[in-house]
């Protein structure tokens, strides 16, 4: 079992950057596939990016491709989402999720553990 804690959100101007972190406060992430999702007010949860347990395979949504990058450092028990060239439409609560012994997953309901989320607001 793992408990996930996201951090790094905040308010940034359009064109700026943020790096989100997802750390395990309980347990190890080293055997977990990880994903990032986001949910804007009034909208459904949306897949952003995912990565396998060893970082060997990853996937990024078309809406953020070329701007967002997912990475992980298992020694630090942390997964990152680097967000560059942010746009106002990236404004949302960002969540990380984990599923043990899995490949890259784009479907939120397949994940077993979720963090509480971190707010990202991009001003125009």
Image (spheres, grey):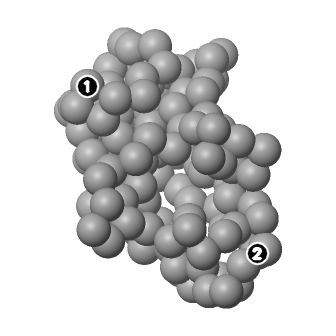
Q: Position of residue 117 (x, y in %)?
A: 34, 62
Left or right of residue 113, residue 48 in this image: right
Estimate how packed mark 2 is, as few (under 14), some (14 to 19) or many (20 or more) residues with alpha carbons within 10 Å.
some
Left or right of residue 48, residue 82 in this image: right
Residue hosting label 1: 110
Q: Where is residue 9 in the image (x, y as percent from the top left)?
A: 52, 72
**Which of the marked residues, 2 or 1, is nearer the chain's N terminus?**
2
Quarter occupied by residue 100: top left
79 and 60: which is toward the camera? 60
Residue 45 appears anywhere in the view: yes
Q: In which quarter of the image is the C terminus?
A: bottom right
Left or right of residue 102, residue 67 in this image: right
- Dot 1 falls on a residue whose secondary structure is helix
Residue plotted at (34% across, 29% down): 107
Residue plotted at (27% across, 68% down): 42
On residue 16, which mark appears? Answer: 2
Q: In which quarter of the image is the N terminus?
A: top left
Q: Position of residue 33 (x, y in %)?
A: 44, 25
Estimate how packed mark 1 is, as few (under 14), some (14 to 19) or many (20 or more) residues with alpha carbons within 10 Å.
few
Quarter occupied by residue 15: bottom right
Residue plotted at (56% across, 68% down): 89
Q: Where is residue 39 in the image (x, y as percent from the top left)?
A: 36, 59
Number of marks in picture? 2
Q: Find the distance from the CA under tag 2 to the CA under tag 1.
A: 32 Å
- Dot 2 falls on a residue whose secondary structure is loop
Residue plotted at (42% across, 28% down): 106
Left or right of residue 81, residue 105 in this image: left
Residue 70 appears anywhere in the view: no
User: In the picture shown, does residue 111 fall above or below 43?
Assistant: above
92 and 27: which is toward the camera? 92
User: In the picture shown, does residue 51 fall above or below 22?
Assistant: above
């Amino acid at each position: 079992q793992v408990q996930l804690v996201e951090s790094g959100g905040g308010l940034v101007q359009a064109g700026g950057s943020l790096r989100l972190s997802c750390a395990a406060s309980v347990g190890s992430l080293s055997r977990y596939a990880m994903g990032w999702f986001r949910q804007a007010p009034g909208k459904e949860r949306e897949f952003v990016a995912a990565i396998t347990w060893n970082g060997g395979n990853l996937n990024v949504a078309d809406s953020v491709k070329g701007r967002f990058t997912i990475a992980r450092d298992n020694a630090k028990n942390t997964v990152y989402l680097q967000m560059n060239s942010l746009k106002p439409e990236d404004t949302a609560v960002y969540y990380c999720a984990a599923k043990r012994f899995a490949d890259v997953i784009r479907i939120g309901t397949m994940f077993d553990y979720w963090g509480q989320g971190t707010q990202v607001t991009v001003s125009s």
